[in-house]
Amino acid sequence: MPVFFLPPDDIVPPDVTVTGALLTHIHASLRTRPGDRLLVSDGKGTRYSIEITECSSRLAKGRILDTLREPSRTAPRVILGQALLKGEKMDWVLQKATELGADTIVPLVTRRSVVRPQASRLHNQQARWNRITLEAAQQSERWTAPTVNLPLEWTEFIGRFDDCAYKLLPAERETAGGIGEVSIGKDPEACIVLAIGPEGGWAPEEVQEAARRGFVTVSLGSRILRAETAAIAALSVVQSRIGELGRND
């Protein structure tokens, strides 16, 4: 059953109120009627099974039948740093990274980035990115949606996560160990940073800067992947290795 995220203020046990874009979706698209059941989330780790008691184009209300809590974390948090990409490629990475379980996504401004953030549009762009991840989190039935940060310059990004136990930098044409071979633990209190470069790849000085801050350069294999493909491939391997992909327990 799809999970719909609601603002916490709209959930006041034993009742739930649905307005805005979600109301339009459940009323016009899903044809929801009184008596139907939905699963809603406060986006903070609590889900509610509700029965719709009222539904019109102006307002929907539901009665809470059951409350579910997010299971305890069993793997490290994953922070994806993604160099800004052109057109819809960035949107695609945000969506798929959400489906694959990234906890935080940080857009990056790198030396070879073609896309540069415009100060006047930053907050609107961030709001749009967070809408994309919210919709993807609902579709993939996540307990919470990842946060998309404001873009960071590369040097600022690599200095922000000194406390993370694992910091990986996939780079093309590297002779370093494969991402499937580097040591990664499963401590749920730890975090993993995964940094993905732009269409033109990392500049040599960026790789050197990252190494000085504890990043480990890794290979994704002999094939040269597009930036958006590299992000999903690397995240899939990492999530599989820490037990968040490929099994249900």
Image (cartoon, rainbow, N blue to C red):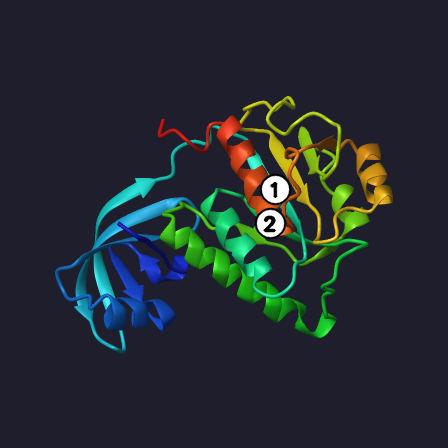
Crowd band around label 2 with a 10 angstrom C-alpha radius: few (<14), some (14–19), many (20+): many
Q: Residues at badges 1 and 2 in contact (C-beta under 8 Å)?
A: yes
| Helix, strand or loop under label 2 | strand
| Helix, strand or loop under label 1 | strand
Residue 82 x, y percent position in the rendering: 65, 50
The answer to which of marks 1 and 2 sits earlier in the sequence is 1
At 71% from the left and 48% from the top, the residue drawn is 197
Which mark identifies residue 105?
2
| Residue most extreme to the bottom | 58
Crowd band around label 1 with a 10 angstrom C-alpha radius: few (<14), some (14–19), many (20+): many
Residue 204 x, y percent position in the rendering: 85, 42
Q: Quadrant of residue 235?
A: top right
120, above or below 171, in the image: below
At 46% from the left and 32% from the top, the residue drawn is 244
Count of numbered circles on the image: 2
At 65% from the left and 63% from the top, the residue drawn is 86
Residue 189 x, y percent position in the rendering: 57, 29
The amino acid at mark 1 is Ile
| Residue on which disc 1 sits | 79
The amino acid at mark 2 is Ile
